Image: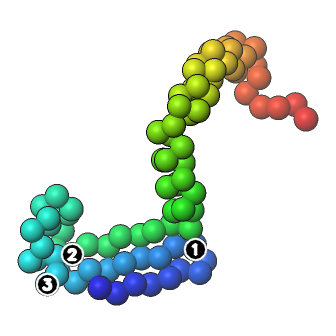
């Protein structure tokens, strides 16, 4: 396995050689290619935190409140020309 950090994008890419993938018992669940590349973005930790938050009761309560607000926003956008803020 090799890794490469891209400073411009802030991502890290991991490259697995085809010999490793060829012998892996999970290859068919992972990829149909001969080798595998996995890229981890600069916001990976935030994404993991968000996934954990999505499992909480607080998230469910927030989504219930959002369900009442979203239709009003859609109506303002579609029927009242409020696609962009005027300021």
Would residue 48 be seen by someone viewing this image from the given angle? Answer: yes
Separation of marks 3 and 2 at Cα, in angstroms? 8 Å
Q: Label 3: which residue?
A: 19
80 is higher (above) or lower (below) than 87: above
Q: Label 2: which residue?
A: 35
58 is higher (above) or lower (below) than 10: above
Residue 87 place in picture, x, y as percent: 91, 35
Within 10 Å of the Cα at label 3, are there few (<14), some (14-19), or many (20+) other Cα atoms?
A: few
Residue shown at 63%/15% (left/top)?
68
Instruction: Give whichever of 60, 84 is nearer the camera.
Output: 60
Residue 28 place in picture, x, y as percent: 12, 61
Name the element at disc 1: loop
Instruction: Give whichever of 54, 9 is nearer the camera.
Output: 54
Instruction: Give whichever of 43, 64 is nearer the camera.
Output: 64
80 is higher (above) or lower (below) than 47: above
Q: Residue furthest bottom?
A: 2
**What number is the disc on residue 10?**
1
Residue 27 place in picture, x, y as percent: 14, 66
Within 10 Å of the Cα at label 2, are there few (<14), some (14-19), or many (20+) other Cα atoms?
A: some
The answer to whether mark 1 and mark 3 are in CB contact below 8 A is no
Name the element at disc 3: helix
The answer to whether mark 2 and mark 1 are in CB contact below 8 A is no
């Amino acid at each position: 396995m090799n890794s490469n950090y891209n400073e411009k994008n802030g991502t890290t890419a991991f490259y697995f050689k085809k010999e490793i993938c060829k012998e892996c018992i999970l290859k068919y669940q992972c990829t149909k290619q001969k080798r595998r590349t996995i890229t981890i973005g600069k916001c990976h930790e935030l994404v993991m935190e968000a996934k954990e938050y999505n499992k909480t009761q607080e998230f469910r309560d927030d989504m219930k409140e959002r369900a009442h607000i979203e239709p009003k926003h859609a109506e303002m956008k579609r029927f009242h020309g409020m696609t962009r803020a005027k300021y």
